[in-house]
Amino acid sequence: MDETYRDRTSLVKGAKDIAKEVKRQAVKKVNKAVDKAQDGYTQRSYNRFQDEEDDDDYYVQGGNYGVEANDDEGSSEATEGHDEDDEIYEGEYQGIPNMGQGKDGIVAFSQPMHDEYKDRHELETERKADEEELAQQYELIIQECGHGRFQWALFFVLGMALMADGVEVFVVGFVLPSAETDMCIPNSGSGWLGDIVYLGMMVGAFFWGGLADKVGRRQSLLICMSVNGFFAFLSSFVQGYGFFLFCRLFSGFGIGGAVPTVFSYFSEVLAREKRGEHLSWLCMFWMIGGIYASAMAWAIIPHYGWSFSMGSAYQFHSWRVFVIVCALPCVSSVVALTFMPESPRFLLEIGKHDEAWMILKQIHDTNMRARGQPEKVFSVNRIKTPKQIDELIEIESDTGTWYRRCFVRIRTELYGIWLTFMRCFNYPVKDNTIKLTAVWFTLSFGYYGLSVWFPDVIKHLQSDEYASRVKHFHNEAVSHFVFNFTLENQIHSNGEYINDSRFIMMKFKSVTFEDSLFKNCVFEDITSLNTYFRNCTFVNTTFYNTDFEQYKFVDSELINCTFYHIRTGCQISFDDDYSAYWIYFVNFLGTLAVLPGNIVSALLMDRIGRLTMLGGSMVLSGISCFFLWFGTSESMMIGMLCLYNGLTISAWNSLDVITVELYPTDRR
């Protein structure tokens, strides 16, 4: 009887010991899971944690469950020294396994729920909480890294990319007059050259901005600037207007990613108290790009002697040299970007903790060495990374071929970009997106519209002044005379040019013949610009090596006339076209007028606030733009343009800062 009682007592004590061991293991697992979530262990350390648990489970299962035990054996080695803790925990553990749950379910009940058992709403809630914690921690880390040599190096590299964007905007307006003449573009088609670039920039901003949130700021910027540089360079050599539009479309598509990516990239290595000021300083490179484009246009395009031709099919004029020179800032930015790291904030957002930590340490060490404090140690060990939510991607079964794999990859990336874009219309950023869209549209409409329109306005005012000095000749009768000099800005009406009148090695510039007769005449080695024959009659006339194409004979009759070696295409061959100098110089002044506004916005951005500066600048620039309606002279138009540019730049700078700060990293 006593032996049976002792066996039963030992069995009860052994069962209690086993229960206590199971509880202790559950506590260990919960504590380790909490430590893992708080400290952000890497996957490698997490695997070691799993291995340790497997060993512990094996130890429990290998215990002396079925052997008789005495009183001393009841206090097993597994529970020795933990009686008090176990008694405290014993009153807290109230878990009841579900129906059908086995012995293993007791341990699993105390473990945190795995991600695969959670719905997407719960995962997104956890990720949002992690992002808020990361934002606070990251701001402290950037403050510890300081502001110094690294930020200034990145400042100049990204400035070159922003400079390329400014150049692209002005290239259209500067090239348009010369390209119209060189490619014989009718007035109805000239507007496409301006529209096509901005169409490409619009699509490019959407695409490259979304791609920067998927693959990284640096990678996206490298690709988009490379696309811009390649097609900008190619456009300088093409001859057809359609192919030229195609190249400028993709050039604009590439440069469209510069602005959204540059400001997102730079803002993520700046502390908040320095963000407004230094982003405003960065905007100065856009102004420098405009000055560079104006200066190069002023120095290159009017020099028609820089051109060459290979027959009548291929002609390379000075404006094409200007297009090549304008691609240099883009090429420089691509080369410099290869030496810069990815944004550490983006890397943390996608869960690449170690890479982000190394870059932040690089920023810290670079700045400390520049300050003369190389001994200062980067004290950050672990950084919070948001919970990563895996996206389910449907892959077709027949993706064995390389082109099918490429198609699936491209389709997946585009779909991801579209999803990122649609998330900009979700709570809580939906209202911000709608309001910012309206502000961006109105500001872009005014500024870019004037940038393209103003060179044409100057050209129109100069044409009116030029037309006021035209010379009229009526009822001329010329016989046996040789014309070998330049005719410019003249109108000849009801004239007769007969009996071997010869026009040899001449230049016609803005000359019109109306209701005139040409009989037994010779036109040889003639170059013309804006020259037309209206309602004229040609009898037994020979044309040799001229550029008189069919469209220059308006309602005219040609009787027994002969054409030899007619040069096709529009000709630019006049060295005395000084109007171009004036147009480019005016744009140079308008761009330079941005400098005071840039300085003011940089100094006051963090003092008076972004919204105050944005609203005040847009109101004042709108008032100045209204007075352009009353401009009747070149000097008045130039003054109002400079005033408008100087006032509107503060709105641009503040809008760039506001847009960056109102969006989270994954949608910035």
Image (spheres, rainbow, N blue to C red):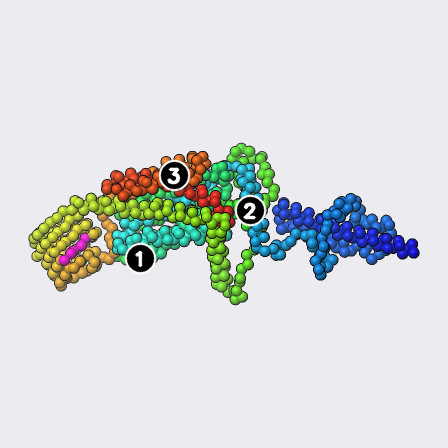
What distance separates the C-alpha of mark 2 from that of mark 1?
52 Å
Question: Mark 2 = which residue?
Answer: 131
Instruction: Residue at 80%, 52% (x, y): give it.
Output: 16
Question: Mark 3 = which residue?
Answer: 616
Instruction: Residue at 78%, 53% (x, y): give it.
Output: 18
Q: Kindly identify which numbered label has been placed on residue 240.
A: 1
| Residue 520 lies within the magenta run | no
Q: Are marks 3 and 1 in contact (CB under 8 Å)?
A: no
- Residue placed furthest toward the bottom: 398
SS class, disc 2: helix
Q: In the depicted view, which residue is nearer to us: 216 or 523?
A: 216
The relative height of residue 656 versus residue 405 in the rendered view (above or below) is above
Q: Where residue 451 sits: x, y (%)?
A: 32, 46
Q: In the depicted view, which residue is nearer to us: 489 or 299?
A: 489
* Mark 2 surroundings within 10 Å by alpha-carbon count, few (fewer than 14), some (14 through 19), many (20 or more): many
SS class, disc 1: loop
Q: Amino acid at mark 1?
A: Gly
Instruction: Residue at 50%, 47% (x, y): give it.
Output: 664
Which numbered disc, 2 or 3, marks the residue that appears first in the sequence?
A: 2
* Mark 3 surroundings within 10 Å by alpha-carbon count, few (fewer than 14), some (14 through 19), many (20 or more): some
Q: Where residue 211 sits: x, y (%)?
A: 47, 52
SS class, disc 3: helix
Instruction: Name the quadrant containing residue 640.
Output: top left
The number of numbered discs placed on residues in the rendered structure image is 3
Residue range (magenta): 531-535
